[in-house]
Amino acid sequence: MDIAITGIGLRSVLGNLTESWQNLIQGKSGIQIQQPFPTFPPVPLAMIGNSPLSLGQIVQITVQEALEDAQLVFPLENCGVAIGSSRSCQGLWEQSARSPDQFPIDWLETLPHQGAILTARQIGTQAMVLAPMAACATGILAVSQGCELIQQGRCARVIAGAVEVPITPLTLAGFQQMGALAKTGCYPFDQQREGLVLGEGGAVFVLESLELAQKRGAKIYGTIKGWGFTCDASHVSAPAENNHSATLAIKHCLERSDLTPNDIQFIHAHGTGTQLNDRREAALIQSIFPEQVAVSSSKGATGHTLGASGALGIGLSLMALQSQILPPCVGLQDSDFDLNLVKNAQSVPINHALCLSFGFGGQNAAIALSA
C-alpha cells in the first residue's frame, strides 16, 4: 500500500518549507559563525534564531503548518503520531544542571518522548503515539513507522516526522572531542570538507492512505514506496567500512518499493561533510547505482539537524519531485568522488527519489519516494 503525503510542516535555518526550498535551489546557506555559549568558542552553526530554540517551539510550528497545509482541523482523535528526536529536551536538562535555581524543570515534561506527546496534545488524538529514537536515522524511522500504522490498519492518518534542537554545550563539546566539528562551514563530498555543522530544525508530515487522500481531494506531494533499516553493530560511532549492512538497507528498501537502482533519478545523501561518512557513503552509492544518478546533500545549507536530518531530507526531496528540480549540494566546490553530484539546480524529470540516513551505532536507513 502506497502512503500519500498530503501536508508538510518544515523549519530550518533557511526558513519554512517554501523558503527553505527556494533558498536551497538558489545555492544559499544559513550557516554562520556564532557563539551561543560564552564558555564555548565561536563555531559555524545553523541556528534559526539568535539563541537556541526549545523543542516545543519547533514541534508546535511544524505540526500546525503540516495540518494547515493538509487542510485539516483539530481535534484529530483517530490520528496516529510518530514524532522522533535524538536529543529531545537535552538543552533544558543542561541548563537546569548548570543553574537549577534559575532554570527549574519538570522532568516529566522533558523526557525523550516529549516531542510526540506535545504533538498528541496539540492535535487531540487518542490513537497510538510513537516516539522513535535512532540517532541520525530517527527521521526516516519515524516516517516509516507512521506508514506501518496505516498499512496495519491501526489508523487511516498519521502525523510523522522528527524535530531537533541540538545546539547545546554538551553536544558541541562531544562532536569537537571526536574531531567531527567543522571550523568554517559544511562542505559535503568536497575535497576540503572539514566536518559537520550542527543545525536546528524539523519536518513533520501528514501521512494518509492513498485512498483516503484521493477520496477527500487532498493535495498530494508524493507517495512513500518503501524503506529499509539495518545495523552494522560494529562501532559506537564509526560506520563499517565494508558497507555490507548499509547495502542491505538500500536493497531491502528498493525490493519493498518494487524499484531497481536504475529507477532512482535522485539521491538525497546523508552527506555530513565529515571525512569518514562522505567517503563511506560515496563508495556505497557507487557500488549500487548507475553513475548517472544525481546525488546531493542539503547539509551545506541547513547544517546537520541530527535526528531530524532524514525528515528534512524527505521534505526537500518531495519538493524536488513536485518541482522536477534537482537541488544543489551547497558547499561543494571540488568533488572528492566520482559521483554525479549536483552543483547547481537543474530541471530534469524525477519520478523516484531515495533518501539516506546513517546514525551512530551503525544504524542505516533508506526510504523511497515517488512523484
Image (cartoon, helix red, strand yellow):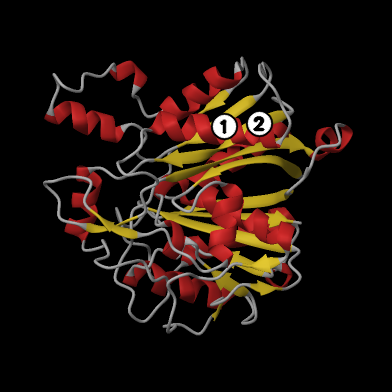
Q: How far is mark 1 from mark 2, CA to CA? A: 6 Å
State how many labels appear: 2
Tags 1 and 2 touching, CB below 8 Å: yes
Residue 54, given in percent of the width and then of the height, sits at 36, 33
* Residue indicated by mark 2: 67
Q: Is residue 158 left or right of residue 3?
A: left
Amino acid type of disc 2? Leu
Residue lying at 57% horizontally and 72% vertically, measured from the top left:
295
Q: Is residue 149 visible?
A: no
Q: Relative to 232, say whether 134 is above or below.
A: above
Say which residue label 1 marks. 63
| Image quarter hosting the N terminus | top right
Q: Which residue is found at the position 56% from the left and 67% from the top?
A: 26
Q: Position of residue 323 (x, y in %)?
A: 72, 61
Q: Residue 13's x, y, as percent?
A: 44, 51
- Locate residue 92: give its quadrant: top left
